[in-house]
């Protein structure tokens, strides 16, 4: 799924930084997620996408980094709301829970949706 998403992003002119893993072997996902989240938090990368079996642990790991708002999304509406209401700067996807076509639809919606601001901005400020 990572390969398909990366290719899709590059085809649309996005730069992609790949923080790994480069194997199908089990790994300790924080070793890969935290560096990706830090790149987003410090502004090196505008947004980040992380993948795991369910995506839950990956979202939890990313959200430990100050300045990251990582949303676990499972359909287009969850992706739309993650951006519109939560200004999510990272997206977590569960490869065991959604297929590749759905993942690409989620990524598209997540990238195309603007943050609404307003009452949502005040709520996000409280998270800081």
Image (cartoon, rainbow, N blue to C red):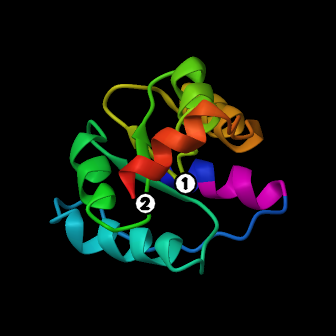
Q: Are marks 2 and 1 in contact (CB under 8 Å)?
A: yes
**Residue 5 showing in the rendered view:** yes
Give the extent of the magenta segment: 6-12
Q: Earlier in the sequence, mark 2 or mark 1?
A: 2
Direction from residue 59 to residue 110 in the image, left or right: right
Tag 2 secondary structure: loop
Tag 1 secondary structure: loop
Q: Is residue 8 magenta?
A: yes
- Pointer 1 local density, CA inside 10 Å: few below 14, some 14–19, many at least 20: many
* Percent position of residue 88, x then y: 53, 46
* Percent position of residue 73, x then y: 45, 31
Q: Which residue is mark 2?
A: 68
Is residue 64 depicted above or below 71 in this figure? below
What is the spatial separation of the Cα atoms under label 2 and label 1, in whole angstroms? 6 Å
* Percent position of residue 99, x then y: 47, 27
Is residue 100 depicted above or below 55 in this figure? above
């Amino acid at each position: 799924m990572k390969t398909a998403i990366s290719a899709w992003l590059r085809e649309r002119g996005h730069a992609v930084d790949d923080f790994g893993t480069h194997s199908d072997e089990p790994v300790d996902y924080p070793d890969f997620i935290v560096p990706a989240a830090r790149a987003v938090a410090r502004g090196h990368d505008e947004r980040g996408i992380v993948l795991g079996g369910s995506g839950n642990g990956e979202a939890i790991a990313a959200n430990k980094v100050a300045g990251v708002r990582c949303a676990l999304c499972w359909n287009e509406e969850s992706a739309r709301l993650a951006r519109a209401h939560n200004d999510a700067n990272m997206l977590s996807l569960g490869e065991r829970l959604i297929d590749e076509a759905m993942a690409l639809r989620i990524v598209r919606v997540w990238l195309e949706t603007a943050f609404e601001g307003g009452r949502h901005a005040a709520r996000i400020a409280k998270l800081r």
